[in-house]
Amino acid sequence: MSQTANKLEIEITKKVRIKYLLHLPDRYEKESSIKWPLILFLHGSGERGDDLELVKAHGIPMIAERDPYFPFITISPQCPEDSFWNAEQDGLMALVDEIVANYNVDPDRLYLTGLSMGGYGTWHLAAEYPGRFAAIAPICGGGNPNRINELTGTPTWAFHGAKDDVVPIAESEKMVDVLRANGGNVTFTIYPEMNHNSWTETYDNPELYAWFLGHSLTLRK
């Protein structure tokens, strides 16, 4: 029986369910004319599951919880148990788009950061959506250096503890080295005496947030 050429055109809709924490700065309601910068934060493997309180254990949601004046809108989604951020990128960007559409967000100042598993997710998501984030800060993570071409235009500040025995520093080094070799805009901070928890010092450092705010998509155009 001979084969015939056929063409099928259909639209496929995927339903994604994501639990997340949303922080609005204390001045958000009073100063409705302001377009706020936004940080998307990806947690580590220990905060997966169905209890959103776990997401507040480290990083940006902890900072936002104790400082209502934190000058960013922040989104802190929770990864389901036994899942990884690199399998959730479609839903993550749908979540970002939903917040941008419904809140006073400056779309030129979207920032991405994460720790450990979330550090891997940061590298991966930025490569999946090049040009969407004004700057990224992966912490003690890693990624696929073959995706570096998608990241060369994104300002990147990576962090890792030299004595990390959970995620070896080589995971960040291979990304940073290839990114530098390809002309990427990357800074790499190594904590010489630090093990896996390189995120507490990083997120407690006000220079990180000043660095974020120093980048916008407008400045890249």
Image (cartoon, rainbow, N blue to C red):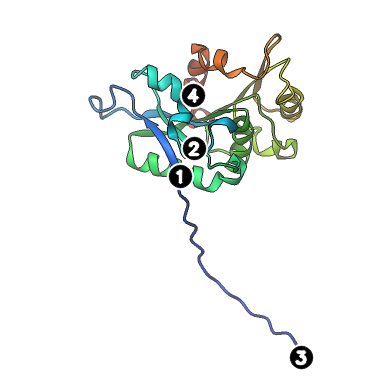
Q: Gap in Å between the C-alphas at discs 1 and 3?
A: 48 Å
N-term-proximal mark, 2 vs 3:
3
Q: 10 Å neighbourhood of mark 4: few (<14), some, or many (≥20)?
A: some
Q: What residue type is labelled 4?
A: Ala
Residue 39 seen by the camera? no
> In the drawing, does residue 125 fall left or right of residue 146?
left
Q: Gap in Å between the C-alphas at discs 3 and 4?
A: 63 Å
| Residue in view at x 62 percent, y 18 percent | 197
Picture layout, residue 205 above or below residue 61: above
> In the drawing, does residue 181 fall left or right of residue 69?
right
Q: Which amino acid does label 2 sit on?
A: Gln
For mark 3, what is the residue? 1
N-term-proximal mark, 4 vs 1:
1
Provide the secondary structure element on which disc 4 rests: helix
Q: Gap in Å between the C-alphas at discs 1 and 2?
A: 7 Å
For mark 2, what is the residue? 78
Provide the secondary structure element on which disc 1 rests: loop
For mark 1, what is the residue? 18
Image coords of residue 112 (percent x, y): 53, 31
| Residue in view at x 71 percent, y 26 percent | 167
| Residue in view at x 56 percent, y 41 percent | 81
